[in-house]
Amino acid sequence: MRPDETSHPTRRVNGAHREKRCRAALSSRRSHRWIFALALVSFVVLFVLTLMCLPTSREDAPIGVRNEPPSVTLLIWWRPFGNRQPLPDCAAGYGIQGCTLTEERGAYDRAEAVIVHNAELMRNWSALPRAPRPPRQKWIWMNFESPRHSGWLAGLGGLFNLTMSYRRDSDIFMPYGYLQSRGGDGDGDAQQVRARRGLVAWIVSNWNEEHERVQYFRRLRKYIQVDVFGRAGQDLISDSVTRTVSRYKFYLAFENSVHTDYITEKLWRNALVSGAVPVVLGPPRENYELFLPADAFIHTNDFRSPLGLAAYLKHLDLHPALYRRYLTWRRHYSVHVTSFWAEHYCMACRGVQASRHQNKVITDLAVWFDS
Ligand SMILES: *[C@@H]1O[C@H](CO)[C@@H](O)[C@H](O)[C@H]1NC(C)=O
Ligand SMILES: *[C@@H]1O[C@H](CO)[C@@H](O)[C@H](O)[C@H]1NC(C)=O
C-alpha cells in the first residue's frame, strides 16, 4: 500500500470533487457555447428570412414607403371602337395610385405598357408600333369579344406580354360584371316582385338566324309569350334597358356564341341590374356557377327542350314563393357591372404594377383564346 493512498484519503476525494466540478464547469461552458452558436445561427436565419420576405426590392422603394405602388405610364394605342370618353383618374375613380394613362404616341418610349385593343388590330395589323420595343415595356392584348367574333388571331403569337379579357385565366381578368358581398347579415334589397306584370323579355340588336340563341327563341315562343325589344323588336321603354326589363319577371340572357367564361352584360346589366331572373344560354351551368349562385339563374340546359323551359317559367309565374327563391341571393350580394373602358384601363394599370418584375411572352394566343 502506498502511503499517500491511505494517509491522504481526503485529498483524493477533494481532487475528485474538484475534477467533477471542473468537468461540470467545462460542460456548462460548452453548453453555453452551444446555446450561443444556436442563437447566432437562428438570428442569421431569421435575418435572411426577413430580408427575403420584404415585398419590394430596395431599388424601387426605400423601406417605409414600400406600400406605395410604382408609377406606371400606360399608353392606349387605339381607343376601342373609337370610344372618346375622357381618360379616367384611376386614383379618384378606383383607388388605384400611380397610374398615368395617355393616348399620346410620343409617350411610347417611356411607357411601361401599351394596350392594344384587338378589334382595331384586326382591321390593320401594320398600324402596331414600329419602333423597337423599349426593353421592359409590356404589350397588353385586350379583347372582350368572343373567339367567334375576334377575327383571325393565329398570327399574334410571340407579340404580347399580357392578356386582358373576360376569361378567368387571363393575365388581367376582367369579367363583364360580378357580385359583391353586401357584408352584414342579409340586409340587402329582397327585390320586390310587384309591378312586374310582364313575363319574359329579350333585347336583341344583332339578329342572326345562324345564332343558336335565335333558333332557341323561335322554338321557345311557340309555348310562351316573349316580348322582343331592340333593333329586331319594339323600342325600349324610355330608351332604357333597365327600365324596360324591370317590368318583367324573366330575361333571356342569351349569348351570341357559346364559349368558356363568355358571360356578358346581357346577364349582369340587362337581367340582374334590372331585377329580372336571368334565363341563360351560354357556357354550361357549372361555368355560370363560378360567377353567381346556382339559384340566381335558370339555364336553358336544365331542360330537355324549350317546351320544358316554357312550362317551368309559367309554373314560377303562378307560384310567387317559388319565383322569389331566385331573388334571395340579393340579400347578400349586389351586382357590379364593369364600366367600359375607364375601369378596364385602370385595372390594366394595376395589372402592370403587379407584374412589373415578371417576364412573359404569350406564345400562342390563338390556341389559348379559342380553346
Ligand atoms: C394601316 O396602318 C398604317 C400605319 O399606320 C397606315 O399607313 C395605313 O394607311 C393603314 N391602312 C388602313 C387600311 O387603314
Ligand atoms: C415582351 O414580349 C416581347 C416579344 O416577345 C419580348 O421580346 C420581351 O422580352 C417581353 N418583355 C417582357 C418584359 O416580358
Image (tube, grey):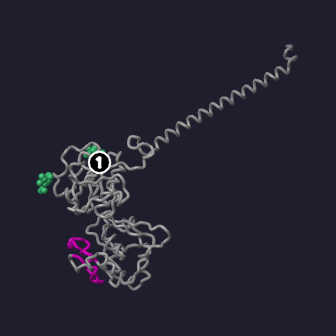
- Classify residue 163 as left or right of residue 31: left
Residue at x-position 27% and y-position 83%: 222
- Classify residue 351 as left or right of residue 328: left
Q: Which residue is mark 1?
A: 112
Whole-percent x, y for residue 258 in the image? 28, 66
Q: Which residues are magenta?
A: 202-230
Q: Indicate the amino acid at tag 1.
A: Glu
Whole-percent x, y for residue 58 in the image? 41, 41
Who is closer to the viewer here, 59 or 262?
59
Dot 1: element: loop
- Alpha-carbon neighbours of circle 1 within 10 Å: few (<14), some, or many (≥20)? many
Toward the top, the furthest residue is 2
- Classify residue 68 as left or right of residue 367: right
Instruction: Let me know if residue 288 appears in the view.
Output: yes
* Quarter holding residue 346: bottom left
* Quarter holding residue 78: bottom left
Who is closer to the viewer here, 68 or 125?
68
Whole-percent x, y for residue 269 in the image? 32, 71
| Quadrant, the C terminus | bottom left
Q: Is residue 225 magenta?
A: yes
Instruction: Let me know if residue 364 appears in the view.
Output: no
| Quadrant, the N terminus | top right
Q: Is residue 265 magenta?
A: no
Q: Quadrant of ligand 1?
A: bottom left
Q: Is residue 278 above or below residue 341?
A: below
Who is closer to the viewer here, 210 or 363?
363
Residue at x-position 82% and y-position 20%: 12
Q: Is residue 351 above or below residue 17?
A: below
Whole-percent x, y for residue 273 in the image? 35, 73
Label 1, ligand 2: CB separation under 8 Å:
no
